[in-house]
Image (cartoon, rainbow, N blue to C red):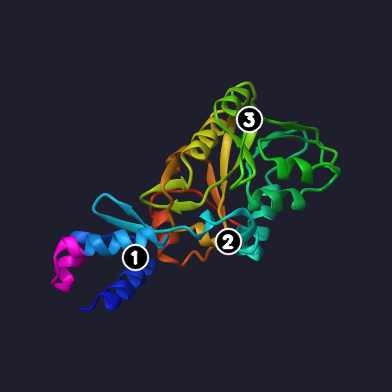
Amino acid sequence: MLAASRRSLLLDRLARDGRIVAKDLAAELGVSEDTIRRDLRELDAEGLAVRVYGGALPASPAVADYATRTRVAPDSKSRVAAAAAALIAPGMTVILDGGTTALATVAALPRDLDCTIITHSVTVAAALLEHRAPVLLIGGALFKHSAVACGAAAAEAARGVSADLFLLGVTGVHADAGLTTGDADEAAMKRTLASCAAETYVMASEEKIGAASRFAVLSLDAVSGVITDADPALASMRALAEAGVPLVSAA
C-alpha cells in the first residue's frame, strides 16, 4: 500500500475507532510496525494525531490559537454553555475556566444572577463586568493561547479559594486518555482549580469528544460529569458511557 493510501486509512481509522494500535494495523496491512509508527509520527507532527504508547489517538482541533478557536463549533459551544450555566444556582461560588466555551457560558448567565465567580481568565472576567456577580480574578503569568493566568503564582493564589462548582474546559475527552489539554502548565493549573471545588463538570463541545491532546488534566472518574451535545450514537460517546462517565446532555 502506498504511503498516501496508508495515511488516508489511518485518518479514517482514527475517526471511526478513536484510536490506532500500531501492531494490529501493521499485521492487517502486511507492513512492518516501524512503517506504521513512522506514519503516525508524521500525522502527529502535522497535528492530526497524538502518539501514545503502542499507537495513536485522534488529535483535538481545539489546540489552535484563541482567535481560530472562536470559530470552531460555535453552535455546539453555545449549547454546552447554556447547559453549564444552568448548573449555577443563586448563592453559589463557581470557578469558571478560561477558553471559548467558558466565555459562551458567561453570555448564557442571567446578568442579575446572585453568585460569585472565580476565574483565572482575563476574557471571562472582562465579560462579567456588567453582571451582578462579584468576580475574583486569579493572577499570574499570562498564557496567551487561552488568555488565562498559569504558573506558580497563579497556582498559589488558586489554593486559597474554595468553590461549590468548577466548570472545566479541556481540549480532549477520550475514554482511554481521559481529559487532556495542549500545555503542561495549563493542565497543572486546571488540576489545581479542580482540587478547590466540591464538584467539577467538564464543558465539552462536539469536536472535543473522542479527541486527545498531549497533556493529561484529570481522569474521567475525577469529575462529576461531562456536559456535551455530541451525538450519543457516536462510537466515542458510547465508549464514554461504557466507561461509566456521567454524560450531561446539552442537545
Q: Residues within 10 Å of mark 1 (few under 14, many from 20)?
A: some
Q: Residues within 10 Å of mark 2 (few under 14, many from 20)?
A: many
- The image quadrant that residue 155 belongs to is top right
Dot label at residue 229: 2
Determine contact: label 1, label 3, CB under 8 Å. Answer: no
Q: Nearer the viewer, mark 1 or mark 3?
A: 3
Q: The residue tagged with tag 3: helix, strand or loop?
A: loop
User: Where is mark 3, residue-wise?
Assistant: 140
> Between marks 2 and 3, how big is the CA–CA gap?
33 Å
Residue 18 seen from this side: no
Q: Is residue 170 above or below residue 163?
A: below
Find the magenta span and give its range.
24-35
User: Where is mark 1, residue-wise?
Assistant: 17
Residue 65 seen from this side: yes
> Between marks 1 and 2, how big is the CA–CA gap?
20 Å
At label 2, the amino acid type is Asp
Q: Residues within 10 Å of mark 3 (few under 14, many from 20)?
A: some
**Which callout, 1 or 2, points at the residue further toward the start of the chain?**
1
Instruction: Name the spot of residue 136 as percent of width and height, x first.
Output: 74, 30
Q: Nearer the viewer, mark 1 or mark 2?
A: 1
At label 3, the amino acid type is Gly
Picture residue at 17% right of the left edge, 60% below the top: 34
Instruction: Name the spot of residue 70 as percent of width and height, x first.
Output: 65, 59
Per the picture, the main secondary structure of the magenta-coloured stretch is helix
Q: The residue tagged with tag 2: helix, strand or loop?
A: loop
**Which callout, 2 or 3, points at the residue further toward the start of the chain?**
3
At label 1, the amino acid type is Asp
> Quadrant where the C terminus lies?
bottom right
